[in-house]
Amino acid sequence: MKIVVRCALLLLFPVVVLAQGTTGSIVGTVTTDGKPLPGVTVTAVSPSLQGSRTAVTGEAGGYSFPSLPPGEYTVTYELAGMQSARKLVGVRIADSSRADAELKVSSVSEAITVTAAAQTAEGTQVTTNFKIDQVNELPIDRSINAVTLLVATGALSLAGLGVRIKRGRLYNITAYAYAGLIMLFALMRSVHLAAAALLFLGLAMLINGALSNGIIQSVVPDELRGRVVATYIFVYVGFPPIGSFFAGLLADYIGVEWAIFGGGLVMLAYGIWAFAKYPEIRAV
């Protein structure tokens, strides 16, 4: 039973990185003459987004667009009897961009366009944003065929390495590689180097995940396997949204890169502690 508990703790390893999140958000308040303006229709469009997002301001004049892909957004504010306004806002991963607007009463149809940089918590930050056209030009296909090929590559790599290295030791290696590549990716400024890092990071993630399932199946007693696997899946799938929320809060204070880097560092520290405390994992 001890080995089951220890494996379950160790198999939570990838959740830290998955919790980093891959989306951002836009929030703001619409006012007129300094007072909140409810009922304003707010629309966000972007080349990074399929279709558009629409929200209506509440009694306090606030609105929110959560879970947006990173990129450049055009946000439009419309209300009958008021001038329409338009803002250009940048959205970053695990970050909340603020876009407030002031509408004025108008008897004629008139539009105001305002260009504004993404506003985050006060402080100096150095960040790197990749536009959607840069991502689309990467030599890595994102179709279902490409994903299937990558999964097959991970499975074949695991099968080949499994003949020469024990599963527990290989799990140890891929966990460290996973954490290290996350930290390296956070500090990169080149989109092409970042793409290469993501390729190897994905391979390490696939091998690590396959090993997790294999280790659970082999060390857990038959009568407990269903419950242990169900718990593992619950944690693996259910915790990332919670982690994404806290990663976004952390990014507001220390920046996106350092939030991602910190996640990798925590993962690395946990791995060092877990593998040192339970060395029998390597013998599985």
Image (cartoon, helix red, strand yellow):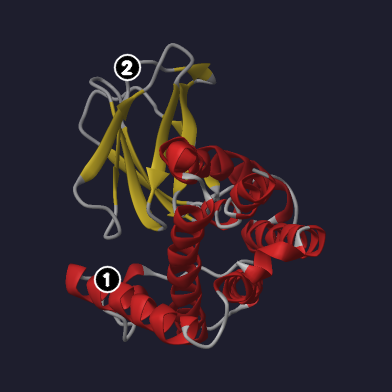
Give the residue at x 24% y 23%: 107
Mark 2, Cα crowd under 10 Å, few <14 / some 14-19 / many 20+, is some
What amino acid type is highlighted by mark number 1?
Answer: Val
Give the residue at x 43% y 69%: 206
Locate residue 244 relative to residue 203 in the image: left or right: right
Please state which of the two labelled residues, at mark 1 or mark 2, is closer to the viewer: 1
Residue position marked by numbered label 2 in the rendering = 39
Locate residue 121 relative to residue 27 in the image: left or right: right
What amino acid type is highlighted by mark number 2?
Answer: Gly
- Residue 23, image x and y in percent? 44, 51
Q: How many marks?
A: 2
- Residue 155, image x and y in percent? 35, 75
In this picture, is 170 found above or below 247? below
Where does the N terminus fall, quadrant-wise? top right
Residue position marked by numbered label 1 in the rendering = 147
Marks 1 and 2, Cα distance to the nearest angstrom? 43 Å
Q: What element carries label 2?
A: loop
Furthest-top residue in view?
59
The quadrant in which residue 258 appears is: bottom right
Residue 86, visible in the rendered structure: yes
- Residue 272, image x and y in percent? 77, 65
